[in-house]
Image (spheres, helix red, strand yellow):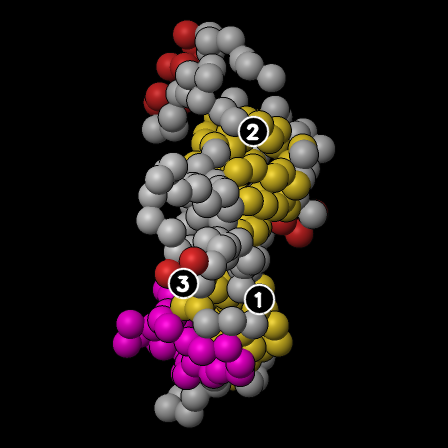
């Protein structure tokens, strides 16, 4: 539904928070962060290149994507904020409110790949005269994501992550530390050009050469194939012990 212009007071408030004030025609899909600690609708399907707009209808909320690619507002806020994100990559993208994730305030954006552009009339035929190739619209699958030990001290010995890919893809593991009901991203592990099948990524409790402080952590893995299709995020938790 198309919205009218925001009142001047609301626009000034959003500007003061550093959030985008959106024109009425900017949103392709809209999601409401409700006073009941839910996203409505919780699941949205859009086409590649479309935009989703979130608005706070009441409560202390924000929008944090599981892969760490988007976090707006940066801190959960009770203001009447409105934020947007354009999805240029096909796949399934999970997100949550950092304050109310444990209460089930989570959502998913499913992005359908744009159809392949047909060749112009009179253009070159595919080699051998066969049919034109079909665009890859299938997101890679990640299964069996786990860590060797869920409770460990930082030592030289590795505690590798393991997982299985359904097709060739690059992967990113985002590691975030729990801080109350929020999670703060501490770093990422990436591997490019992995083949289908089972893989391990070495991890010894250090990121960028620094030891992780004792505490509870969450690791989120996503995979993206050569066609740009992105998998749904898979998450596990682990604890770094002191001493």
User: Could you tell me if the residues under marks 1 and 2 are in contact, i.e. CB atoms within 8 Å?
Assistant: no
**x 47%, y 11%: residue:** 6
The C terminus - image quarter: bottom left
**x 56%, y 72%: residue:** 166
User: Mostly what secondary structure, the magenta segment?
Assistant: strand
Q: CA distance from mark 3 to mark 1?
A: 33 Å
Task: Return the disc, 3 or 2, that comes first in the chain's sequence.
Answer: 2
Relative to 114, 150 lies left or right: right
Number of marks drawn: 3
Q: Nearer the viewer, residue 199 or 118?
A: 118
- Looking at the image, residue 240 lies above or below residue 178: below
The answer to whether one can see residue 149 in this image is: yes
The mark closer to the camera, 3 or 2, is 3
Relative to 99, 23 lies left or right: left
**x 56%, y 51%: residue:** 92
Callout 2: 10 Å neighbours few (<14), some, many (20+)?
some
Q: Which residue is mark 2?
A: 29
The N terminus - image quarter: top right
Residue 62, horizontal then vertical, whole percent: 52, 38
**Dot 1: what SS?**
loop
**x 61%, y 39%: residue:** 45
Q: Does the segment drawn in magenta span residue 189?
A: yes
Q: Which residue is mark 1?
A: 141
Callout 3: 10 Å neighbours few (<14), some, many (20+)?
few
Residue 165, horizontal then vertical, whole percent: 53, 74
Q: Does the segment drawn in magenta span residue 117?
A: no
- Looking at the image, residue 98 lies above or below residue 20: below
Residue 29, horizontal then vertical, whole percent: 56, 29
Q: Nearer the viewer, residue 178 or 96?
A: 96
Q: Please report the bounds of the magenta region as a residue range.
A: 187-213
**Dot 2: what SS?**
strand
Q: Which residue is mark 3?
A: 128
């Amino acid at each position: 539904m198309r919205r009218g212009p925001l009142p001047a007071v609301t626009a000034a408030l959003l500007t003061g928070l550093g959030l985008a004030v959106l024109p009425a025609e900017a949103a392709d899909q809209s999601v409401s962060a409700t006073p009941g600690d839910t996203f409505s609708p919780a699941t949205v399907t859009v086409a590649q290149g479309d935009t989703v707009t979130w608005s706070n209808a009441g409560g202390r909320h924000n929008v944090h994507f599981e892969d760490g690619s988007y976090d707006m507002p940066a801190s959960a806020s009770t203001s009447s904020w409105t934020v947007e994100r354009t999805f240029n990559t096909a796949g399934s993208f999970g997100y949550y409110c950092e304050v109310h994730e444990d209460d089930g305030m989570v959502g998913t954006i499913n992005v359908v790949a744009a159809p392949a552009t047909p060749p112009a009339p009179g253009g070159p035929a595919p080699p051998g005269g066969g049919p034109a190739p079909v665009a890859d619209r299938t997101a890679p699958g990640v299964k069996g994501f786990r860590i060797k030990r869920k409770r460990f001290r930082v030592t030289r010995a590795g505690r590798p992550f393991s997982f299985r890919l359904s097709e060739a893809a690059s992967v990113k593991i985002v590691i975030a530390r729990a801080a109350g009901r929020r999670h703060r991203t501490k770093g990422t592990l990436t591997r490019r050009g992995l083949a289908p099948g089972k893989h391990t990524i070495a991890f010894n409790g250090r990121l960028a050469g620094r030891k992780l402080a004792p505490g509870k952590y969450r690791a989120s893995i996503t995979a993206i194939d050569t066609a740009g299709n992105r998998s749904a995020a898979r998450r596990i938790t682990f604890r770094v012990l002191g001493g």
